[in-house]
Amino acid sequence: NKGIELSVNIREANINFMTEPDITSLFDNLFDNAIEAAEGCENKFIDFSINMRNKNFLVVNFANSCNTAPKKQNGVIFNSK
């Protein structure tokens, strides 16, 4: 309802090692942040994927549109609010 294009690729995901509350907490926070950044943009999008690497590493990727670049200090991204 916010007009944000969503692309999801989680076919190879195996997150059985996480509890349901942890999964909900993690993805709720990531989606909230991505939606907040994207909703003010003209070209609104969120790309979400989960991939397994070497059967031992889980890679979660969120990419989203944003009107301003993230703020960094000493190489660390922070929220300026």
Image (cartoon, rainbow, N blue to C red):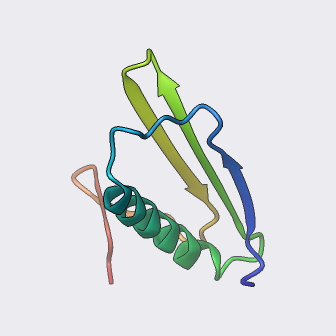
Residue 20 sits in which quadrant? bottom left
Q: Residue 59, percent across and down?
A: 45, 36
Left or right: residue 26 versus residue 61 is: left
Q: Residue 19, percent across and down?
A: 32, 52
Residue 79 higher or lower than 75, as above or below: below
In the image, farthest residue toward the top: 54
Q: Residue 38, percent across and down?
A: 62, 73
Residue 70 visible in image: no
Residue 59 higher or lower than 79, as above or below: above
Left or right: residue 70 versus residue 9 is: left
Residue 13 higher or lower than 37, as above or below: above
Q: How many labels does the image show?
A: 0
Q: Residue at x 72, y 83 (%)?
A: 2
Q: Which residue is drawn at 40% across and 39% down?
A: 16
Residue 56 sits in which quadrant? top left
Give the quarter of the figure containing the N terminus. bottom right
Give the quarter of the figure containing the C terminus. bottom left
In the image, farthest residue toward the left: 74
Residue 18 visible in image: yes
Residue 61 higher or lower than 57, as above or below: below
Q: Give whichever of 31, 70 is nearer the camera.
A: 31
Q: Give whichever of 72, 62 is nearer the camera.
A: 62
Left or right: residue 61 versus residue 76 is: right
Residue 34 sits in which quadrant? bottom right
Q: Residue 37, percent across and down?
A: 55, 74
